[in-house]
Image (cartoon, rainbow, N blue to C red):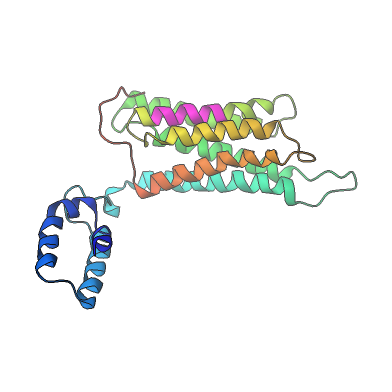
Amino acid sequence: MNGILRLYPRAWHDRYGEELVALLAERPATLLDSIDLIRGAIDARLHPQVPGADVRPDKEIPVTQRLLGVVAAIGGIAWILAVVSMFVLPRNVDRDRDSSIAIVGLAIGTALTGIALGELGSRRGSTSSALVGHVIAVVGIVFAVMVPIPWPIFVIPLYGFPVLGLVAAVRGSRNDALPGWLPVVFGAALVGAFVGYMGSIETDPSLALIGSIGLAALTLAWVAVSGRTAGTSETIPV
């Protein structure tokens, strides 16, 4: 029975948990009671009415935040597909794979992920913070434009964007606009990307680690769409 009670949101459990446990101690729950409790737990999470419930109603999540979550998701998928194409596309007569899909995917992923990071990491109601977010978004777009440019220019976005992602994630966390653990995700992605860039598609499968940026972008998308933020502590907006 304790397992069923854990299905309820924390706020609901804090308010009604002891009363329900006492009631069940007087009269053990039947099978129908257990089914009803499970149904109640699902309803409590889908339609929270207790202040402070773990899951916020969908209407409380701004539409713009949801759209930016979709933008981040598209960017993450594009990045991952770009990396996958490096391994699965057929080779030509020179034993080289067509890199056009990878270039387009990396450019799209860089631009969209940069936009989402910059805008989602801004503190609401702060003009200066919004301006910094726009700058981050523009830098992401500039990096995207540089991706198709031959060596050595394309090296700049390949190494610069993972760093930008980490910096933007830290900024969003400090602004209480993104969770405090998100910089860890983008930090791991930065390490993975750098290790991947040292590999070769011919001899080193570590090249696949470049896709870690895409996974970080998908994590950002989940954070935005689900409405999760860092909290409400006072920070300096940047």
Q: Residue at x 56, y 31 (%)?
A: 190
- Quarter where residue 189 is shown: top right
Say left or right for 148 vs 223.
right
Point out residue 122 in the picture as x, y percentages from the top left corner.
Answer: 37, 31
Seen at 24% across and 54% down, the residue is: 9
Side of 216 where 28 appears, left or right: left
Name the quadrant of the C terminus. Answer: top left
Q: Is residue 159 above or below residue 178?
A: above
In the depicted structure, whether residue 8 falls above or below residue 128: below
Q: Is residue 58 magenta?
A: no
Measured from the top left, where is residue 183 in percent x and y?
A: 45, 32
- Where does the magenta region start and end? 162-172
Quadrant in which the N terminus appears: bottom left
Residue positioned 49% across, 31% down in the render? 137
Nearest the eye: 146 or 193: 193
Q: Position of residue 10 (x, y in %)?
A: 23, 51
